[in-house]
Image (cartoon, rainbow, N blue to C red):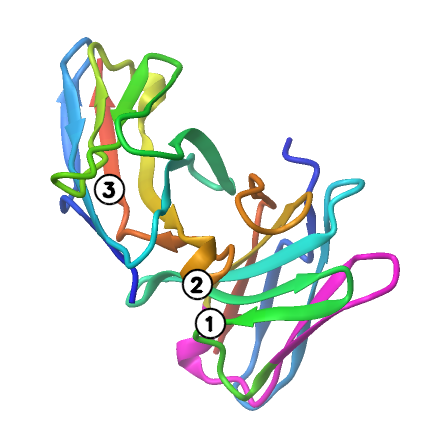
């Protein structure tokens, strides 16, 4: 158990809908990262938050947004969903940024039908 | 930009066989290198890491050496077990040039048969 929790575990929704994925980092960790794992794109970095502030963006679509709250949990919002958004979404946390070890949650499997 | 290339899978071995999974990288700075493992239905777990040239990371019988001259970080294990069946990802982090994000290879599915 990494100490990172993600909810829900599975999500099935229709095209055009909006969903919110939630991540609680390990106790004391200030950084939260989101990654997407799909069959055609592999594992890709989406976005990094540190202590409530956005630090870096990767290949994140404009339809996707994220935030980190004062209690350090994070949410990833996916809107106008398309079939191609079906993937496993991982959250990871680390103590700080830089070369701090990242601990991964179990992931949320999103299926868009 | 940074990138990681892994040998394509899947790889199927018999128990007690020797394992090598090749990984090469491209980076503009001085990256840290990692191997992560993903068991079925689970998240990624850090298997081992190396932070500078010639460092050797090791864990649970797995080893990898950071080779700057060949830009490689190949994963090896002398005698695999059925319980090693999983997907293995090579990754790098290059904070000075791309922040603390991890850049992953494609993943290699390993199946070990009894």
Tag nearer the camera, 3 or 2:
2
N-term-proximal mark, 3 vs 2:
2
Q: Is residue A51 magenta?
A: no
Residue A67 left/right relative to B70: right
Give the extent of the magenta segment: A65-86
Picture quarter with the N terminus of chain A:
top right
In percent of width and height, residue B97 lies at 41, 62
- Which residue is disc 1 drawn over? A58
Q: Quadrant of residue A65?
A: bottom right
Say whether mark 1 and mark 3 are on the same chain.
no
Up-down relation of residue A90 to residue A56 (above or below): above
Between B11 and A75, the residue placed more toward the observer is A75
How far is disc 3 from disc 2 in space, using C-alphas? 25 Å
Q: Which mark is residue B108?
A: 3
Q: Chain of mark 2?
A: B
Q: Are marks 2 and 1 in contact (CB under 8 Å)?
A: no
How far is disc 2 from disc 1 in space, using C-alphas? 10 Å
- Which residue is disc 2 drawn over? B98
Between A29 and A79, the residue placed more toward the observer is A29
Tag nearer the camera, 3 or 1:
1
Q: Chain of mark 1?
A: A
């Amino acid at each position: 158990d990494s100490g990172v929790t993600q909810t829900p575990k599975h999500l099935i929704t229709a095209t055009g809908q909006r969903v919110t994925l939630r991540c609680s980092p390990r106790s004391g960790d200030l950084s939260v990262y989101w990654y997407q794992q799909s069959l055609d794109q592999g594992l890709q970095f989406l976005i990094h938050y540190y202590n409530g502030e956005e630090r870096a963006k990767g290949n994140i679509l404009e339809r996707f947004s994220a935030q980190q709250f004062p209690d350090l949990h994070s949410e990833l919002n996916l809107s106008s969903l398309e079939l191609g958004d079906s993937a496993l979404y991982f959250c990871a946390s680390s103590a700080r940024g830089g070369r701090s070890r990242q601990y991964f949650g179990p992931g949320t499997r999103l299926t868009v039908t | 930009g940074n990138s990681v290339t892994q040998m394509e899978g899947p790889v199927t071995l018999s128990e007690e066989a020797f394992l090598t999974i090749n990984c090469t990288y491209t980076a503009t700075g001085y990256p840290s290198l990692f191997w992560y493992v993903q068991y079925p239905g689970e998240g990624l777990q850090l298997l081992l890491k190396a932070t500078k040239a010639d460092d050797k990371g090791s864990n649970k019988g797995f080893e990898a050496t950071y080779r700057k001259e060949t830009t490689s970080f190949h994963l090896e294990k002398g005698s695999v077990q059925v319980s090693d069946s999983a997907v293995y990802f090579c990754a790098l982090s290059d904070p000075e040039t791309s922040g603390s994000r991890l850049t992953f290879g494609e993943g290699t599915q390993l199946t070990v048969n009894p």
